[in-house]
Image (cartoon, helix red, strand yellow):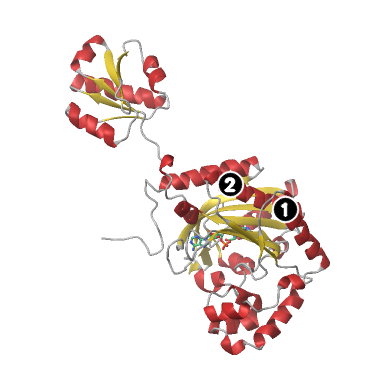
């Protein structure tokens, strides 16, 4: 037997309803906030991710699915969507028609991580980006939208963590201070962090190795190094969250796992998922468009993990849909009538089912029960002669005669 790949999950009926609910709710909320959908490819040139996410990040160093195509070009299965959205924005000159764009996308991402509950090698993200607005109000608006979406999904026990990562003016000084802090503790750091110490000491803040996180907990805070513009921006974000009465925690050690962030960074976590507790994360990336060869335009966005949300919605049995009516027909003539009837109902948007083959009424009703239908419509020989059928409400057991000789309108009125 050929099995699926480790970390790549099938999403089967029974689970897929939660995916659909999450995606449909996200589309509705995003569009109410002025976002338009963008569909981007799953495969991009490796260089796009290396340049945007950063060469020294775990994603680029260890987690990308990269391969050479038949012409020897290095391609990568996208580990995230932001880089592709920005590439498309620049490539199609979207900023020329209107510099402000609010774009969302939904789809699978690929990261070669160690699979566990809530962490997979193919996982789905719902991603939102706002390009062209540097005002802190948009940072607040994005978090308001994200929390509103979570509320609509029924996910309310969450924590919002925020931080500011400074800008190209103030971050270099922080990086140097951080470097001298870690230099004095270099012998305790893990081999990866020893390397990060030279390449990008900020990445040490993200290390999950216990000894490293202990060192990080005493590290200097980036918030003491922010320039006055970054400080004002951060103050306005916090003030905006207060206006919307959104509780938040400032976490100066949250640097996020991608190198492109400037100023605001945020993450939504829950304590209901175990180790993989981040359900959404994002932040501002004011230099990224320019670094990718585009205009000097700011941007901000976030992505949420659909698998983690789906785990939180595990108990939502109300998301299942059941057929409205099961037509139980006895004898071949009644079966033919039933066959035409279910087609006519489906064309009217009513989910109808029947059994194929000559089965007993008992067996057909068993199937109707199994399908959890609202109604059964029984067509026997007797009914056939009079052009009628018996409509049974499966919940109450109430039965009544329905005249089908003049069409299906009466039936539709009763069941819809
Ligand atoms: P990220 O924090 O790497 O950010 O991922 C966002 C979310 O994707 C996480 O909070 C988590 O819910 C989910 N996620 C990440 N990796 C996995 C995995 N292996 N299995 C299951 N779920 C996972 C980004 O990707 C940025 N592009 C977000 C962003 C958009 N920043 C600005 N714009």
Q: Give the crowd class for mark 2: few <14, some 14-19, many >=20 residues within 10 Å.
A: many
Q: In the rendered image, which quarter contains the N terminus? A: bottom left
Question: Where is 161 relative to 409, above or below?
Answer: below
Asked whether residue 356 is in view, the answer is: no
Give the mark nearest the N terminus, 2 or 1. 2
Q: Decide which of 385, 51 is in the foreground and name it.
A: 385
* SS for callout 2: helix
Disc 2, disc 1: CB below 8 Å? Answer: no
Residue 311, image quadrant: bottom left
Percent x, y of residue 132: 74, 53
Q: Residue at x 40, y 40 (%)?
A: 320
Q: Which residue is mark 1?
A: 242
User: Against 138, is 25 above or below?
Assistant: above
Residue 396, placed above or below residue 389? below
Nearer to us: label 2 or label 1: 1
Q: CA distance from mark 2 to mark 1?
A: 19 Å
The residue that appears at 37% across and 46% down in the rendered structure is: 14
In the rendered structure, the answer to whether residue 240 lies left or right of residue 326 reads: right
Q: Position of residue 162 (x, y in %)?
A: 66, 62
**Residue 149 image label:** 2
Q: Residue furthest right?
A: 228
């Amino acid at each position: 037997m050929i099995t699926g790949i480790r970390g790549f999950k099938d999403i089967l009926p029974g689970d897929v309803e939660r995916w659909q609910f999450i995606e449909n709710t996200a589309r509705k909320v995003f569009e109410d906030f002025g976002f338009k959908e963008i569909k981007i490819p799953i495969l991009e040139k490796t260089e796009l991710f290396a340049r945007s996410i950063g060469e020294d990040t775990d994603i680029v160093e260890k987690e990308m699915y990269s391969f050479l195509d038949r012409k020897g070009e290095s391609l990568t299965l996208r580990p995230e969507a932001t880089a592709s959205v920005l590439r498309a924005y620049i490539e199609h000159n979207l900023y020329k028609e209107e510099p402000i764009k609010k774009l969302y996308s939904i789809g699978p991402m690929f990261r070669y991580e160690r699979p566990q509950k809530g962490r997979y090698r193919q996982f789905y993200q719902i991603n939102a980006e706002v390009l062209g607005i540097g005002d802190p109000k948009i940072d607040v608006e994005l978090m308001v939208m994200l929390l509103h979406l979570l509320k609509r999904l029924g996910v309310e026990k969450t924590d919002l963590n925020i931080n500011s990562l400074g800008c190209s003016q103030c971050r270099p000084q922080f990086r140097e201070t951080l470097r001298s802090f870690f230099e004095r503790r270099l012998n305790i750091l893990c081999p990866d962090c020893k390397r990060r110490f030279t390449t990008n000491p900020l990445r040490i803040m993200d290390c999950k190795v216990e000894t490293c996180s202990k060192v990080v907990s005493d590290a200097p805070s980036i918030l003491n190094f922010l320039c006055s513009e970054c400080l004002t921006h951060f103050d306005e974000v916090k003030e905006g969250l207060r206006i919307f009465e959104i509780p938040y925690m400032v976490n100066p050690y949250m640097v996020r796992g991608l190198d492109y962030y400037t100023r605001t960074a945020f993450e939504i976590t829950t304590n209901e998922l175990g180790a993989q507790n981040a359900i959404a994360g994002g932040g501002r990336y004011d230099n990224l468009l320019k670094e990718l060869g585009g205009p000097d335009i700011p941007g901000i966005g976030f992505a949420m993990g659909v698998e983690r949300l789906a785990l939180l919605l595990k108990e939502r049995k109300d998301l299942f849909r059941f057929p409205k009516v099961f037509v139980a027909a006895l004898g071949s003539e009644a079966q033919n009538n039933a066959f035409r009837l279910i087609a006519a109902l489906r064309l009217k948007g009513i989910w109808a089912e029947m059994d194929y083959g000559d089965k007993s009424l008992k067996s057909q009703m068993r199937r109707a029960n199994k399908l959890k239908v609202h109604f059964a419509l029984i067509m026997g020989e007797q009914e056939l002669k009079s052009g009628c059928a018996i409509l049974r409400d499966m919940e109450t057991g109430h039965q009544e005669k329905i005249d089908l000789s003049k069409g299906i309108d009466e039936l539709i009125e009763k069941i819809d």
